[in-house]
Amino acid sequence: MSALLDVRGLTLAYGKVEVVHDLDLAVPRGSVVALLGANGAGKTTTLRALSGTLPVRRGSIHLGGGRLDGLSAYQIARRGITLIPEGRGVFPGLTVRDNLAIAARAAKDVSAAEREARLERVLGTFPRLGERAAQRAGTLSGGEQQMLALSRALLADPEVLLLDEISMGLAPIIVEELFEKVAQLRAEGLTIVLVEQYLTYALRFADICYLLTKGRLAFVGEPDELAQSRVLTSSYLGVG
């Protein structure tokens, strides 16, 4: 299967310190790819590079054949990559309705009718947000804020959605609900790259897993293969 998002030899650094080394990553269209590893492995750094918020030291990033490395975050977003960062990134002082309206207006070259149609689809996916449309985002629960962050991202109609720790700080029942929404989005054909602390969810919902250890690729394969591999225990617990 050909890759929608194709990364070759990606090397990333903060200052003079390289933190991701020569990473190859292939993301097929319509798949969920999990990027896993212990804290400090380079997962979030990789998502930042894919979204254009961190410059690429070496290597290339292609989306649908078009090269992205060297473009600004705004240009990359317009090409079709949307990042939901750790911490959600909603506007806490604005209402749910205003958060969604801002995201809808930022969508790439679409008519008012299409923006309204996207908004209706989003509220159909997350009906709880419709019930809280007049409520300030900062007063929502953590799970509802994550739903709002997902909704804002979906209004951009991305080619690839990057999810960074969507379960962070949430109760297990809310995490389950969020991942059911992720499964629904995959079923609708959305391509997703997922960084996730809960291995059980990542292994359940991913089609392909990439495991990073100290910024280097230690494993690539299907979730069942990774679950049975010693490299998983070695990477997370430091035993082998």
Image (cartoon, helix red, strand yellow):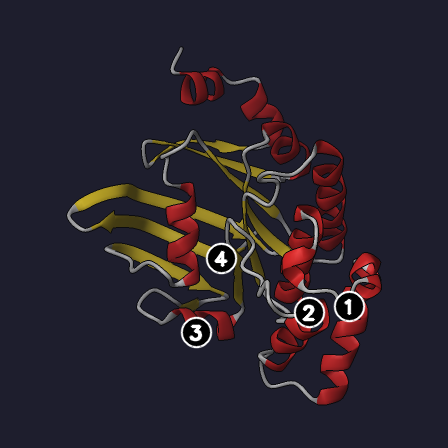
Q: Which residue appears at 63% of the width and 49% of the height?
A: 31
Q: Which residue appears at 84% of the width and 62% of the height?
A: 131
Q: Which residue appears at 32% of the width and 37% of the height?
A: 215
Q: Is residue 223 above or below residue 86?
A: above
Q: Which residue is mark 3?
A: 74
Image coords of residue 205 (percent x, y)? 67, 38
Amino acid carrying label 1: it is: Ala
Q: Which residue is mark 2?
A: 95
In the visual, does 14 lie left or right of 91? left
For the residue pair 139 and 115, the one nearer the viewer reads as 139
Q: Is residue 60 above or below residue 194?
A: below
CA distance for labels 2 and 3: 24 Å
CA distance for labels 2 and 1: 7 Å
Residue 7 can be seen, yes or no: yes
Q: Quadrant of residue 62?
A: bottom left
Amino acid carrying label 4: it is: Leu
Classify 10 Å Cα crowding around label 1: few (below 14), some (14-19), many (20 and above).
some
Q: Which mark is residue 133?
A: 1
Which mark is nearer the camera, 1 or 3? 1
Q: Which residue is mark 4?
A: 5
Q: Is residue 172 above or below residue 157?
A: above
For the residue pair 124 and 66, the one nearer the viewer reads as 124
Which mark is nearer the camera, 2 or 3? 2
Classify 10 Å Cα crowding around label 4: few (below 14), some (14-19), many (20 and above).
many
- Of the numbered discs 3 and 4, the one sitting upstream in the chain is 4
Dot 2 and dot 1 residues touching (CB under 8 Å): yes
